Every structure is written in C-alpha cells, then in structure tokens.
Amino acid sequence: MPWGDYGSVLLSGMTMHLEREKGLLQLERTGPFVPPISFPAPGHVVVTDDFRQRLEGSGLSGVSFRPVIKKRIVHLEWERWDRSTADPPVFPRSGEPEDYILERRHSRRLAKAIGDLWEVCLEQKVLAELVRSNAAPWSTEVHLLLASWDGTDFFRAKGVLYDYVSGRAKRWLEETTPEWVAFEAALVK
C-alpha cells in the first residue's frame, strides 16, 4: 500500500486506540471496501468472513478466530483513488492519518453492510532468541529456534508479535490474496 501511515490506516484501520472489550478487538476503519486480510496493529490480523471460511477450508493448521467489534466504521471510498501517486489526493484536516477515521461519524448501516470481521488468533509454536544486530548496536534480530517448531502453518514465537507462516501457508496466501500480503524470510537457528 502506498502513502506510508496514511495508506496503512486506510487499508487496515486501527485497533490501537481502544482496549479490547470482553477480550475482543475493537476496530475503527473505513468502508465499504475491506480487504480480505489486514493488519491494523502489530500482532493483530483481521479477516473478512469470506476469507475466514476459505482459510478454514484450506487444510492449513494453527488458526482460530474471534469476532471483531466494529466500533467505528466510516464511509470513505479511498480504494477508488489513484494509488500510483506519491501522496493520497485527500489528507485529513489535522494531517494525522488516524483522522481519516476519527474525524468521521460511525455508520451502523455501513458496519452491517461490510459483514462480520474476525481476528486471526495464533498460538506460540516456536521459541525465539533475540540477538543483538551487527548492523546497528541498538537493534536486535529475532532468530527462530527451528528445532522447537512443531510444523504448524500459522504461528507466533514466544516474546515477539511477528506472525509467521510455513512455506505451505505462504504459497496458499500468495495464491489466494497476493495483493494484500507480503513476506520476509525468518532468521532461524
């Protein structure tokens, strides 16, 4: 998605401003367009109902789901904008990306129209070791301890919020929703 934080908020919405309610994520986002999979905050993955059903039928392991509370769904058809431009054609008055959503009114009709949304819940299935990076003394690298992994297709590592997938899950995601996912190779030991 182009446009840095502006594009990120438009595409994925936000879950960081509101605490969970009864254990459920509260999502603030634009509509009516919702991508099949989105990442509204570190460690949070949200999918549409159609994509949840496809994922459940994929034969891949490691995913469970919780409903998402659609706390603020606002009308903004940004998906019609030309994404090849350096900047979005419209900025919030405040200049803050979050205000694409926060400056607009919640629409119950739109929230209902976009259908159910689901949080993807992943379990910790591998151990990780944090290693000081040689590239920058203040940063660390996450190394997965491969011998501790049980082969689950979607998983997390203890102590980090990254989402990991097996090669099989990566191929399925690339075939199913290539426009909305990107991958980076994990460091392993």
Image: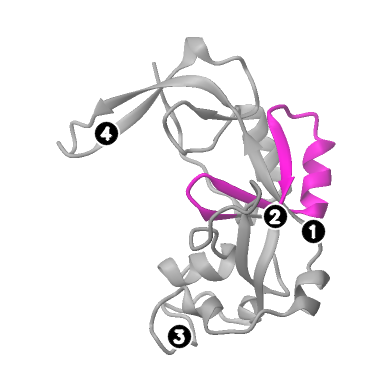
Q: Are marks 2 and 1 in contact (CB under 8 Å)?
A: yes
Q: Which residues are magenta?
A: 39-68
Task: Check the image and report above or below for 80 versus 163.
Answer: below
Instruction: Identify the mark at residue 91; answer none if there is no mark.
Output: 3
Query: Which residue is tagged 1?
Result: 116
- Reading the chain from its start, which is encountered first: label 4 or label 1? 1
Query: Which residue is tagged 2?
Result: 68
Q: Secondary structure at mark 2?
A: loop
- Reading the chain from its start, which is encountered first: label 2 or label 4? 2
Distance between mark 3 and mark 4 Cα atoms: 35 Å
Image quadrant where one finds the C terminus: top left
Identify the residue at image location x=53%, y=78%: 102
- Reading the chain from its start, which is encountered first: label 2 or label 1? 2
Task: Check the image and report above or below for 150 versus 26.
Answer: above
Mark whose residue sits in front, 3 or 1:
1
On screen, residue 138 versus residue 159, left or right, reads: left
Distance between mark 2 and mark 1 Cα atoms: 8 Å
Q: Secondary structure at mark 3?
A: loop
Mark whose residue sits in front, 2 or 3:
2
Identify the residue at image location x=54%, y=63%: 14
Q: Are marks 4 and 1 in contact (CB under 8 Å)?
A: no
Distance between mark 3 and mark 1 Cα atoms: 28 Å
